[in-house]
Amino acid sequence: MTPATIEERLARIEAFDLRRVHPNLRLGTASDRYAGWIGQIYPEHYRRAIKTRPRRLEGRTFEERMLPIASVRDYFTHFDVLELDFTFYRPLREADGRPTSSLFTLQQYATHAPPCACFLLKAPQQFFAATLRRTRGGRVLYETNPHYLDAEACRRQFIEPARDVLGDRLLGVIFEQEYRRVDDSPDPEANIAALDAFFDALNGEVQAHLELRSPHLLTPAYFDWLDRRGLGFVFSHWTWLPPLRRQWRLCGERFTAADRNAVVRLLTPLQMTYAEAYARAYPFDRPVPELAGTRQARDMVLDATALVFRAATEGVTVNVIANNRAWGNAPDLARTIARRVLEEVRRREMA
């Protein structure tokens, strides 16, 4: 089959067909079932299948409007990869082996997704968060997690059932660790030692990508350790992390995942909390100028694009995951990056 021309790919992009934009790029989103994407990703008939539920967030109530899981069939006619995050909140099996609701949900995704689908799953916070956020009597508390870095439980309750359900469609697992202040963190070397023991016990059963949200833990020794172990560094555009280009310098300008995949997560504007970004982006059906029209947003797109071309020189595939909160509408953010990548391809061909 003759490869599509740049003009043909640009025409597809306008219709939100964001597959096969560049051989070193997969585009996807963080979660997928947003009713606000009807008319972009999902056909109009899904309006009859919308389910709603209230969501309380810092004193405000939002109506979440969601589509059935079967809509993932349509999702993968537009994107190459999907990040699922419901596994972050609950493992796939209980400690005694009983299936959880998360396992049933993942099985439905596996049933409805095409054979060529690629999934990134978030590891349960139960096994990778040092502290857990709890609400009691209206008060928010942070409690020490007794299951932190329990590799055996992580394997039994999450990794093994995830592989059983998804098989080769499981592209990798994102291990996200919460922001910790310097005074509440271990010494960076001690942190590496603890993580090393955890991943040693997991024995490389899946490709892991790590997102530590505490900048003071992102030391040269940490990146050297990722490289030695073949663990991926997640380039994350998130509230308290440095810009993507700064993260590229911090990691020694290298990709570290053994399977030659990299993950770029475009989550929230820098210096903006989850709740504020959510409120501004809601109801997620269009780009929001105060999110998408800023210098920071432009730099985010340019930095993600630059990573794609650096990856191309090293035989790496970059999986760019767009989030509604970073832009107002994740499909439009992904489309903006796709356009920018093809503009750069054309510029280089004409040079």
Image (cartoon, grey):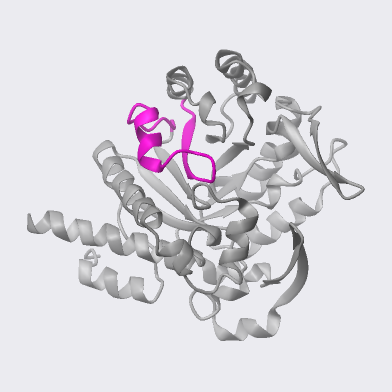
**Residue at the image position 21 percent from the left and 56 percent from the top:** 344
Q: Position of residue 244 (x, y in %)?
A: 40, 42
Q: Evaluate whether residue 78 shows in this view.
A: no
Q: Residue reaching furthest right?
A: 137
Q: Position of residue 345 (x, y in %)?
A: 20, 57
Which quadrant would residue 31 be assigned to in this image?
bottom right
Q: Residue reaching furthest left?
A: 351
Q: Nearer the viewer, residue 178 or 91?
A: 178
The stretch in magenta equals: 230-258
Is residue 231 rendered magenta in the image?
yes
In this rendering, position of residue 1 left or right of residue 197: left
Q: Position of residue 37 (x, y in %)?
A: 54, 74
Above or below 343: residue 96: above
* Quadrant in the picture for the N terminus: bottom left
Above or below 3: residue 216: above
**Residue at the image position 49 percent from the left and 29 percent from the top:** 231
Which quadrant would residue 228 be assigned to in this image?
top left
Q: Position of residue 60 (x, y in %)?
A: 74, 64
**Residue at the image position 43 percent from the left and 30 percent from the top:** 258
Is residue 190 rendered magenta in the image?
no
Above or below 45: residue 218: above
Q: Nearer the viewer, residue 114 or 207?
A: 207
* Quadrant in the picture for the C terminus: bottom left
In this rendering, position of residue 283 left or right of residue 64: left
**Residue at the image position 65 percent from the left and 22 percent from the top:** 183
